[in-house]
Image (tube, coloured by chain):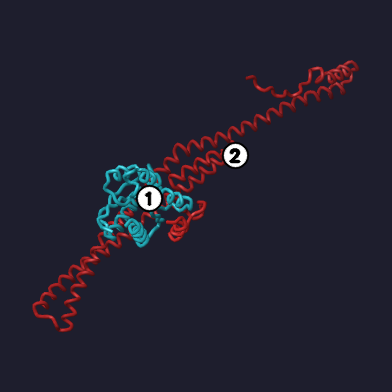
Amino acid sequence: MAKKKQKAPIKLSLKERFGARLLSLSTALEAEDEDAFMAELNSMVRERDDALWTQLRKLTSDLNGALERFQLDSRLVDLAEKEVPDAKQRLDHVMKMTDEAAHKTMDLVEQSGPLAGRIAKEAAEISVFWQQFMSRSIDPQAFKQLLGRIDEFLHSAQKDTETVRANLAEVLMTQGYQDLSGQIIRGVIKLVTEVELTLSELVKMATLDRSEDQRSTDQYHATRGHGPVVPGVDHGVVVGDQVDVDALLSNLGM
Amino acid sequence: MSKDLRFLVVDDFSTMRRIIKNLLHDLGYANVTEADDGNTALPILQQGNVDFLITDWNMPGMPGLELLKAVRADAKLKAMPVLMLTAEAKREQIVEAAQAGVNGYVIKPFTAVTLKEKLDKILDAKK
């Protein structure tokens, strides 16, 4: 299909553009009027200069724009090729650290629980005999047994509580991941801020229609999930806690 | 309800699976299998050795909502009790899960008491 004809700017003929000027030049020439001749000539040259300057200004501004865009583009390439993959790796590391810390904490808690349980159980059992002893209703054989158990208990309780104490100290140390992961996450937040700024500059340069993209993103999250609610981030209508969930489900007849 | 109940816990985070597994153990349920998303959970469910499904929503691979829908669409599995244990808190999501046939919805972070309460409620209703 033929391109729609654009309205061409009105182009004056040579005669229209220079006829009057040449006439006054030639009149001045005939009359040997040097002042008039030179004034007319200067005026013509100035006109040519103005056009040249306009062109030059346009070129400079184009070049400026291209340079700005190039800087933005190369920063974006740098972000996309290096810093974003780096950030992914850094966040992976954070995940690994939190995973390890959580498992280690759970290991230590699981190790300590039975020890505390054993001490409590032993103490409760000894306590029964101890009450008999206190009320003087214990026979000599059982008393001898009681002394043996108390002796054993004192040793094992000392050992077990020492292990529990060491485990608790270890749990405390394990929380050190928060400092390291916090620093990494802070770095990633800085990067995300820069990506955001660079992209919004780019969007400003090329005003895009985003409504279609927004719909497909919403659809994606509706099935896959949005993740936990983060304070300060707009999540739409969310429930506050389990009480709200129960109320909502009860309204739905569940 | 029998303590021999066989549970499948589906969550992409091993720490969360471990927490749920420990809580189930504390409640007396010792038979707990784990899976890290819907894709790994479905074959386990289809083997027919699971009585109760506890699943997260937001997981790589197949998310929990799709797993729930797949369970409800499977003739052999459709009566399976499903408890969703998730951080997804959007009102419309909870409604969607309810419409897809979830039996209970517990929001993270959760307590041992809440988990027990919801489990008991579902199991009582199934009696």
Which residue sits furthest top?
A30
- Chain ID for label 1? B
Chain assigned red:
A
- Image location of residue A41, percent across then percent down: 81, 22
Please name which of the two marks, 2 or 1, marks the residue nearer to the observer: 1
**In the displayed structure, would residue A121 be above or below residue A178?**
below
Task: Describe residue A200's horizontal placement relative to residue A103 as left or right.
Answer: right
Residue at image position (37%, 49%) is: A95
Gap between marks 2 and 1 measured at Cα: 40 Å
Q: Quadrant of the C terminus of chain B?
A: bottom left
> How many tags in the picture?
2
Task: Describe residue A174's horizontal placement relative to residue A116 as left or right.
Answer: right
Q: How many other residues sit within 10 Å of disc 1, few (<14), some (14-19) or many (≥20)?
A: many
- Image location of residue B17, percent across then percent down: 32, 52
Chain assigned cyan:
B
Point out which mark residue B56 bears: 1
Q: Disc 2 residue type?
A: Lys
Point out which mark residue A110 bears: none
Which residue sits furthest left?
A141
